[in-house]
Image (cartoon, grey):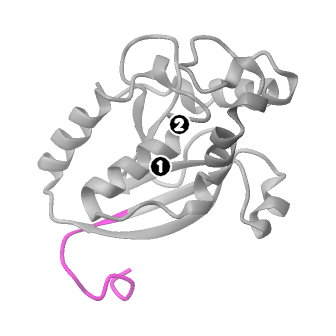
Amino acid sequence: MEAQNGGGGGAPVVLNVYDLTPMNNYLYWFGLGIFHSGIEVHGMEYGFGAHEFPTSGVFEVEPKSCPGFIYRRSVWMGTTNMSRAEFRSFIENLAGKYNGNAYHLISKNCNHFTDDVCKNLTRKSIPGWVNRLARVGSFFNCLLPESIQVSTVRHVPTHPAFSVMWKSWTSTCCHQTSIL
């Protein structure tokens, strides 16, 4: 990784991207896909998932091993000069803005979280392809099933096209222990 960051100091900031569906093997080459992402800093990976409580949905896992997802690739985002303790304080403060019951597939998902972390640490956004489907969905909000239109999700989506993905999502990463 030193070659990727030009030999600069600081802790690496790496975006780990996972497939939510095997369809990504085809969609990926068209710049599309349904992805989960986590941000790896100081040897741990941090992500955001849904649950029904008004508490943080931010969790930590071993890098490249978020349960229930298929690791696709890592993307070098840069470095941070925050110490481990400073970063821990930063992530705990940010976690307060990401409650599990505020998770939304289109407007506040795991990729929004990792983008927020990256912007704060490296001044760079995550690659556009990682959350492209959510951005496309927001433009066509009026065409989406009411259960996933842009408003806070307080229940499981009822539209059949999303129920399988939602069940898979909520049975895996969403039930990780939050860090707060």
- Percent position of residue 19, x then y: 69, 51
Q: Is residue 117 left or right of residue 35?
A: left
Secondary structure at numbered mark 2: loop
Please tell me the numbered disc located at residue 22.
none
Q: Is residue 35 covered in magenta?
A: no
> Disc 2 marks which residue?
109
The answer to whether residue 172 is visible is: yes
Q: Is residue 42 left or right of residue 146?
A: left
Q: Is residue 122 left or right of residue 82?
A: right
| Disc on the earlier residue, 2 or 1 | 1
The part of the chain drawn in magenta is 1-13
The amino acid type found where label 2 is placed reads Asn
Secondary structure at numbered mark 1: strand
Q: Could you tell me how many numbered marks the image carries? A: 2
Q: Is residue 53 above or below residue 170?
A: above
Q: Is residue 2 covered in magenta?
A: yes
The one nearer the camera, 109 or 1, is 109
How far apart are labels 2 and 1 at the CA level?
Answer: 11 Å
Q: Is residue 8 left or right of residue 95?
A: left
Q: Quadrant of residue 11?
A: bottom left
Residue displayed at 87% across by 23% down: 160
Q: Is residue 1 above or below residue 35?
A: below
The answer to whether residue 41 is visible is: no
- Percent position of residue 55, x then y: 36, 16
Q: Quadrant of residue 79?
A: bottom left
In this view, the mark in front (2 or 1) = 2
Residue displayed at 81% across by 28% down: 164
> Disc 1 marks which residue?
38
